[in-house]
């Protein structure tokens, strides 16, 4: 059984992560965070020990090569851990829960190249950066102190939870939503309860993203939603508790910006809402001013660049072989006017006339 197939048999699945009671969870984590801040100076260094490993290991499975067996699941949450260096030796682990500790460094996880599922909520992490883990599909770093999204580059990652951190996208700060562009398999992204103001940083390369939770951030302008149009599969968006939700006709304006959106916050769009938004988009397009056709300085009307490109090239178009390449010109006088030479040992021709700069390379076809 492969690492990817094995994930289907593991009980804590994606649905469990999405169906949490958000309101209750937020209150509990906020209370815990305040308590931890009060006693943070009293923490005693507590490394992960072999005895803790024996208590937390479970789920005996075949190793990747099928020649041996190893425990692949570890749960060591709420142990006041400050160090997980020991995990470097447990390379067969696939499911790891190290939540609700005092961890600031996850680098030992870089050795767990078979890791499929990771939960590191409620620690003191300032970054979620790890080496690329080739099989990691579900990762949760909720309620830490993470300030950016850089260094999250796991190619099979399908669900990422970063809610309750300190991610900030103010233009005058370096903290922003970036570094997620290559997560082409990411379907679910939780960025709730951060300080996000702008939606810059999302990329069309995130071609699998379907669900984006931005609840409890600081997005004030609904025009920011235009930056999400390049996400081809985005169908569900949560914007509750952002300033932009106070705008009049908030739901309608959001749908005008994102025609493919199916659900906003907790409600699906009705056909009537969708038809009205389509009508608004059509009217907006009709009201856009037409671009003026540029005129030549001599006073005669000249076609636009687009019109020139749309015209068929003259029948006397000539092709000139130069140095293994070809140069094309639509000008009737090109045969006489276009001349190239190769000074010295240069392999590239240089333009002599026809708008070229002497000594500069010609354009290649």
Image: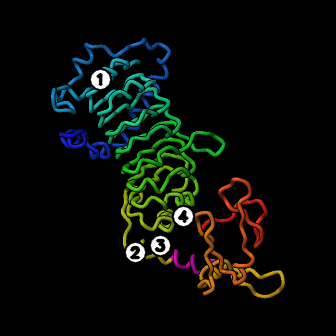
Residue labelled with disc 1: 76
The reply to whether residue 290 is visible in this rendering is no
Judged from the image, the secondary structure of the residue bearing numbered disc 2 is helix
Indicate the position of residue 223 as horizontal and vertical percent values: 57, 60
Residue labelled with disc 3: 277
Q: Residue 112 carries which label?
A: none
Q: Would residue 224 be found to the left or right of residue 191 on screen?
A: right
* Residue placed most toward the observer, 162 or 239: 162
Residue found 45% across the figure and 54% down from its top = 205
Q: Would residue 77 be found to the left or right of residue 220 on screen?
A: left
Lower sequence index among marks 1 and 2? 1
Foreground: disc 2 or disc 4: 2
Foreground: disc 3 or disc 1: 1
Foreground: disc 2 or disc 3: 3
Indicate the position of residue 192 as horizontal and vertical percent values: 45, 44
User: How dense is the environment of label 4, judged by Cα within 10 Å: few (below 14), some, or many (20 and up)?
Assistant: few
The reply to whether residue 214 is visible in this rendering is yes
Q: Are marks 2 and 3 in contact (CB under 8 Å)?
A: no
The magenta segment: 280-289
Residue found 22% across the figure and 23% down from its top = 57
| Separation of residues labelled 3 and 1 (CA atoms) | 50 Å
* Residue placed most toward the observer, 215 or 88: 88
| Separation of residues labelled 1 and 4 (CA atoms) | 48 Å
Q: Quadrant of residue 5?
A: top left
Q: Is residue 128 above or below residue 292?
A: above
Residue found 79% across the figure and 63% down from its top = 358
Residue labelled with disc 2: 272
Q: Would residue 262 be found to the left or right of residue 222 on screen?
A: left
Q: Of all residues shown, which one is farthest toward the right?
A: 298
The kind of secondary structure the magenta stretch mainly shows is helix
């Amino acid at each position: 059984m492969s690492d990817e197939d094995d994930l289907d048999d593991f009980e804590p699945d994606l649905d469990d992560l999405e169906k949490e009671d958000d309101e209750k969870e937020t209150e509990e984590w906020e209370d815990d965070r305040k308590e931890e801040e009060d006693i943070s100076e009293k923490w005693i260094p507590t490394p992960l020990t072999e005895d803790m490993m024996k208590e937390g290991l479970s789920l005996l499975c075949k190793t990747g090569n099928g020649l041996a067996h190893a425990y692949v699941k570890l749960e060591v949450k709420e142990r006041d851990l400050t160090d997980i260096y020991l995990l470097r030796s447990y390379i067969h682990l696939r499911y790891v829960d190290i939540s609700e500790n005092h961890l600031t460094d996850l680098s030992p996880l870089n050795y767990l190249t078979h890791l499929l599922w990771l939960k590191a909520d409620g620690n003191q992490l300032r970054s979620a950066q790890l080496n690329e883990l080739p099989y990691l599909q579900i990762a949760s770093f909720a309620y830490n102190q993470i300030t950016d999204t850089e260094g999250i580059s796991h190619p099979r990652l399908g669900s990422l939870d970063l809610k309750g951190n300190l991610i900030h996208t103010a233009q005058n700060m370096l903290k922003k939503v970036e570094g997620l562009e290559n997560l082409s398999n990411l379907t679910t992204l939780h960025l709730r309860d951060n300080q996000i103001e702008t939606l810059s940083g999302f990329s069309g390369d995130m071609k699998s993203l379907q669900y984006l939770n931005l609840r409890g951030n600081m997005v004030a302008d609904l025009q920011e939603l235009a930056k999400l149009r390049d996400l081809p599969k985005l169908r569900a968006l949560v914007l509750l508790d952002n300033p932009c939700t106070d705008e009049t006709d908030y739901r309608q304006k959001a749908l005008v910006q994102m025609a493919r959106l199916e659900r906003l916050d907790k409600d699906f769009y009705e056909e009537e809402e969708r038809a009205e938004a389509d009508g608004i988009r059509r009217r907006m397009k009709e009201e856009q001013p037409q671009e003026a056709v540029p005129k030549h300085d001599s006073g005669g009307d000249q076609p636009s660049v687009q019109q020139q490109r749309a015209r068929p090239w003259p029948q006397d178009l000539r092709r000139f072989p130069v140095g293994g390449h070809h140069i094309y010109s639509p000008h009737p006088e090109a045969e006489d006017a276009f001349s190239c030479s190769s000074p010295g040992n240069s392999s590239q021709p240089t333009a002599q006339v026809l708008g070229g700069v002497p000594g500069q390379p010609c354009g290649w076809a």
